[in-house]
Amino acid sequence: MNNNLVYENTQDEIKTELINGKVFMMSPRPRLEHNIVLGNIFGLFWTYLKGKTCRAYCDGVDVFIDEKNRFIPDVMIVCNPSIRKKDGIYGAPDLVVEVLSPSTAHNDRFRKKEIYAKAGVKEYWIVDPLNCIIETYLNQNNDFILDKFYNTDDTEIKVSVCDNLVVKIEDIFDYIDEL
């Protein structure tokens, strides 16, 4: 991959993603609910995966899909150690979680979702922190098919890419009600 074609971030620059060769600004300051849910999911994944081959990563890690697509998912699980490099992930993570923000929801639901599916991401979650809803999608023939729609009436989600990883819905949305 020619890294000269990929827009790189530094700590002083605004976070961006590259989608089909076009630079998109990311939400500069997400709502508190966004950070709480992102942290909860990452913590649950990280704790389960500690000592295993798969690794959990959270917001701030670049995923280089190809020369025209570089994303920064909110949370991801990567099981293939060969795609992990010092400056990011080069290839498809096994699972990607996007926590919706008003300014980036359209990209998460459509543009990025389609590209992730074609790249071979096995499982994709869209999490709505304001309404406490989770949509899980599974990849079938490079297309995401809705697996299940979860809300606070449900109890848990089985993560398909990890044996025995079951996440409680209440743990994902823990602390939201304190706001």
Image (cartoon, rainbow, N blue to C red):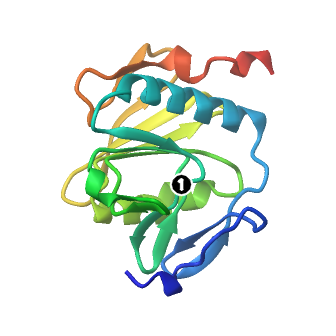
Residue at x-position 51% and y-position 55%: 109
In the drawing, does residue 171 fall left or right of residue 175? left
In the drawing, does residue 128 fall left or right of residue 150? right
In the drawing, does residue 79 fall left or right of residue 69? left
Q: How many marks?
A: 1
Residue 152: tell me if it is visible.
no
Residue at x-position 65% and y-position 69%: 9
Pointer 1 residue: 61
Quarter of image, res 45: top left
Q: Where is residue 40 in the image (x, y as percent from the top left)?
A: 57, 26
Work out whether residue 147 or residue 94 is closer to the camera in this orientation and state it.
Answer: 94
Q: Where is residue 132 in the image (x, y as percent from the top left)?
A: 60, 27
Question: Considering only vertical position in the picture, is 160 above or below 89?
Answer: above
Residue extending furthest toward the left: 141
Residue 116: tell me if it is visible.
yes
Q: In which quarter of the image is the C terminus?
A: top right
Crowd class of label 1 (few under 14; some 14 to 19; many from 20; radius 10 Å)? some
Residue at x-position 79% and y-position 50%: 29
* Disc 1, SS: loop
Residue at x-position 25% and y-position 20%: 164
Question: Considering only vertical position in the picture, is 129 above or below 100?
Answer: above
Q: In which quarter of the image is the N terminus?
A: bottom left
Q: Which amino acid does label 1 sit on?
A: Val
Work out whether residue 25 or residue 148 is closer to the camera in this orientation and state it.
Answer: 25
